[in-house]
Image (tube, grey):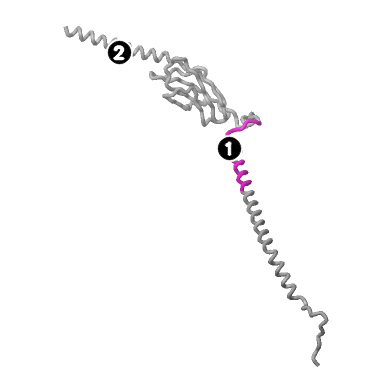
Amino acid sequence: MAKPCLSAAALLLLLLGSFLLASSVKADAVLSAPLNVTIRELEVNSALVTWEILEGDPVIGFAITQQKKDVRMLRFIQEVNTTTRSCALWDLDEDTEYIVHVQSISMGGSSPPSQPVLFRTPKESEKMASKSPDEVTMEEVGQAAQLRAGELIIIVVVLVMWAGVIALFCRQYDIIKDNEPNNNKDKAKNSSECSTPEHPQGGLLRSNV
């Protein structure tokens, strides 16, 4: 009687394992490839790739393959435990064509790759020519801020120097003004000492014979 019980238990375990395996395969098959893969913010040496996923897909990350056209070398970018739907591509060469694929990642594996997206980075000269006169980059803003800060420092230094010169002039003027009465007294005294002594009116000077 023990053998039929063991056989039934083994059959139950086998059915349970088959069910779990089928569920895993089904979950992997449900995960769809990313949709609407788009290249944005295209620069000479960088770009931003964005995409969408089907609602309900158990996505926990993404994987991106980046390849130069007609070149076999690939760059592989992968990130998990994230809900982001965009990724920056960096260190690109100017005036170069690239092909990008995006895959979604779940606990059961990866989705099929998305439709390939082909784009070309612009030339430096083309990017500069396409920039409008009113467009200001962060680098230009930083340079302008540094220039303004330098100008303010120079203005403050000049004002301080002028204030010092004016203060020194006022001090010298006060000293000169305070010394004027003493100089006048000294001049009057010197003039009186150098003048001819007066004789009493009507007096005669007689010489001894």
The answer to which of 136 and 163 lies nearer the viewer is 163
Instruction: Look at the numbered disc 1 and give the secondary structure of its residue.
Output: helix
What x and y, as percent, mark residue 143?
59, 39
Disc 2 crowd rating (10 Å Cα; few below 14, some 14-19, many 20+) is few
- Nearer to us of marks 2 and 1 is 1
Along the viewing direction, whichever of 208 and 165 lies nearer the viewer: 208
Residue matched to label 1: 142
Q: Quadrant of residue 188?
A: bottom right
Write down the region rendered in magenta: 133-156
At horizontal 66% and vertical 56% (from top left) the residue drawn is 170
Please name the residue that numbered disc 2 is placed on: 17
- In the drawing, does residue 20 fall left or right of residue 96? left
Which residue is pictured at 17% across the width and 8% down the height?
A: 2
Neighbor class of circle 1 (other Cα within 10 Å; few <14, some 14-19, many 20+) is: few
Q: Nearer the viewer, residue 132 or 126?
A: 132
- Which amino acid lies under the numbered mark 2 shown in the image of this protein? Gly
Q: Position of residue 74 (x, y in %)?
A: 47, 26
Query: Considering only vertical position in the picture, is 158 above or below 47?
Result: below
Q: Secondary structure at mark 2?
A: helix
* Count of residue discs: 2
**Is residue 140 on the magenta stretch?**
yes
